[in-house]
Image: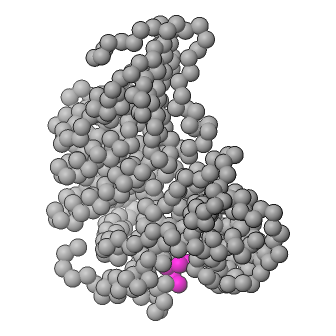
Amino acid sequence: MPGEPPPQVVELESFLAERGERLLRTAILLTGSREAGEDLLQTALERLIRNWRAIRGNPEAYLRRSLTHLATDRWRRNGRWLIKIGMLRTLGAGEQPDETSHVDQRDQLVRLLAQLPSRQRTAIVLRYWEELNEAETAEVMGCAVGTVKSATSRGLQRLRELSGIDSAEPQATAGGQQR
Amino acid sequence: MRQELTDLLRAGMERVPASVPPGLARHAYQRYRKRRTRTRAAGAVAGMAAIAGAVVVVLAAEPGPAGPRTQTTAYVVSKVARALDAAPSNYVMFDRLAGLNIRLDSWASASRSRFEQFTSAGQLVVDEGFTFATDTVVSVNYQKKTWFRSVFPNYGGSSLAPSPSCEFGGMMVVVFPQPRAMAAQLRAWVACGLLKIGRSSVVDGVEAVELVAASSSGTMTYWVDTSSYLPVRVTTSGSETGSSTRQDLRWLPPTPANLSQLTVRIPAGFIQAPPPKPGN
């Protein structure tokens, strides 16, 4: 880009220096791969620049909402198979997770996120990574609080089944308001 | 218990590497400007749909100032090459080639590859697989009803995945596509300035952008998925021979069913034959 960048780009660069890593991680978790996450964030930034004048002081909320909607659009467009593969390999049928290593379990759970349907994955990322409460998550996703509750609960249940972690435990607090 | 699962999940999310590439906001701004320019160009001739289409294509193909154009192509190719480098570990690549009076279906993973060659009438001629770790080839000839097993060093290396160069011929990637060979070739071409970004289009329902390499011997075009940066189609057209080929690529999850496509099956009754001598 020849010459000085416009002020909004300079402002955006400084915002990204502070919050970019967190947003990129959200994008990676939503898409299932680093490449797709970077591309998603760049598309969201492009959308932000286009609507810069309409954004009043909170680019993060706008970007988070854009990431969520763009990821859903992408998922619909590309079909499940492309998204499912993602960041890392998942366990094959009959394989058991390494119970001795919490590191393995943590990484495994993130890998398995990519196997969830879009809505469940989005709800879990917003609730447990972005740490939004159910009302905030519902606002970002553009759905009812009840939908967030059920998507989160089903997503966690599916992760539990796929990972084999605490599969015997009851869901005592499913759908609760914990942050 | 549930708390433990969510704690582990949070901890896993924290561990996902995520460093923002430098210049991301500027790249987004460039894309925004480019899109706005195209939209305005198309809008300027609204009502003349055919002409509008031509204007958009011309703008996309128009060589801009050397810096930005080179940077944009290099940026896209770096993403494509990275995706291709990582692909063998994450996918089974399926490639269907049509043209040159044959059809070739091939599969490739990190450890094995296989192709089936058909006549233009759809008759299976050869089914051949290669295991990288042992350099072992298993090949079935359906016309002669024979098969052989042999060790062919460099089968999947220099002999069929040519060294990257600034030159190319129409048959280059057609013979035996390997994701990492494609990545090396694309990197070489962008370093030579041979590769240009073309127009965007939808290929089999996937939004894709063209990477076009043109030389005196012909044109080779990669259509790259703008989401995954993996090629979904490769075409060649020879300017002298007039021949053309088309390869459609699919990146399949490594499920047992897809992995089984990498295995050659020897039909009952086929006779084992001595392997051909090197060079044949």
View extreme (front): residue: A100
Rendered residue at 24%/26% (across/down): B241
Quadrant containing the C terminus of chain B in the rendered view: top left
Name the residue furthest bottom: A57
Q: Is residue B201 visible?
A: no
| Residue B27: percent from left, percent from top | 32, 71
Residue B27 in sight from this viewpoint: yes
> Is residue A173 found inside the magenta-colored segment of the image?
no
Residue A37, above or below A129: above
Within the magenta stretch, is there residue A62? yes
Please determine whether, in this image, residue B139 is positioned above or below residue B74: above
- What residue is at 63 percent from the left and 61 percent from the top? A100
Residue range highlighted in magenta: A61-65
- Quarter-wise, where is residue B177 in the image? top left
Name the side, left or right, on which B192 lies relative to B51: left
Q: Quadrant of the N terminus of chain B?
A: bottom right
Where is residue B54? Give x, y as percent: 31, 54
For the residue pair B68 and A158, the one nearer the viewer reads as A158
- Left or right of B139 in this view: A163: right
Which SS does the magenta portion mostly show?
helix
The residue depicted at 35 percent of the width and 38 percent of the height is B235
Q: Nearer the viewer, residue B238 or B88?
A: B88
